[in-house]
């Protein structure tokens, strides 16, 4: 399976602008810029998109692992916070912190934490990231 996304950038780093699109059409020429990435201006940025991918991937992986253990979640809600920091004369994504709350009938806390940890390390996006990955998991 292969998925595609694309980006177009025009101009210099600080004054230029770009757009990102996905092959599915979920994003079509969504604008981004230096200001949306580093100065808090409204709009998207690569780290936000990586966070969405990590949160979505983790939630699906956790659902799969729960199913394999005989549990069906009512709801899994995950937020990923991506850290972009100066490193080695440039910038690097240094961490992804996952915060997850789930409603899962019949599961005990120890089993919940064990399976959530397996999802954290097993999700394909976690495997891709060369960053520290942390998780706060709560039963709702």
Image: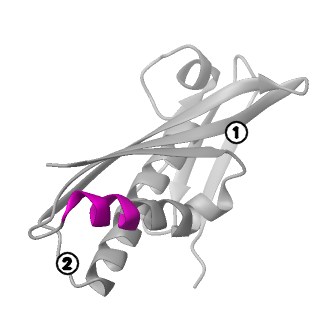
Question: What quarter of the picture does the N terminus occupy?
Answer: bottom right
Q: CA distance from mark 2 to mark 1?
A: 45 Å
> To which quarter of the image does residue 91 belong?
top right
Pick the residue in front: 72 or 93.
Answer: 72
Residue at position x 60%, y 27% from top? 33
**Residue contact between numbered discs 2 and 1, judged by CB atoms under 8 Å:** no
- Left or right, 10 with reference to 18: right
User: Residue 132 location in percent, x, y?
Assistant: 64, 43
Lower position in the chain sequence, tag 2 or tag 1:
1
User: Residue 29 location in percent, x, y?
Assistant: 50, 47
User: Residue 32 location in percent, x, y?
Assistant: 55, 33
> To which quarter of the image does residue 71 belong?
bottom left
Pick the residue in front: 6 or 82.
Answer: 82
Pick the residue in front: 128 or 50.
Answer: 128
Which stretch appears magenta? Answer: 108-115
Residue at position x 13%, y 48% from top? 140
| Residue beneath disc 2 | 71
């Amino acid at each position: 399976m292969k998925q595609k996304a694309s980006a177009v950038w025009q101009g210099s780093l600080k004054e230029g602008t770009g757009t990102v699109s996905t092959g599915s059409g979920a994003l079509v020429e969504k604008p981004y810029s230096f200001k949306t990435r580093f100065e808090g201006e409204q709009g998207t940025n690569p780290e936000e998109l990586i966070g969405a991918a990590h949160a979505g991937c983790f939630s699906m992986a956790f659902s799969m692992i729960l199913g394999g253990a005989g549990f069906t979640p009512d709801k899994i809600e995950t937020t990923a916070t991506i850290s972009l920091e100066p490193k080695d004369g440039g910038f690097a994504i240094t961490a992804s912190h996952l915060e997850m709350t789930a409603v899962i009938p019949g599961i005990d806390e120890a089993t919940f934490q064990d399976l959530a940890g397996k999802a954290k390390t097993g999700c394909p996006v976690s495997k891709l990231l060369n960053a520290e990955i942390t998780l706060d998991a709560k039963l709702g």
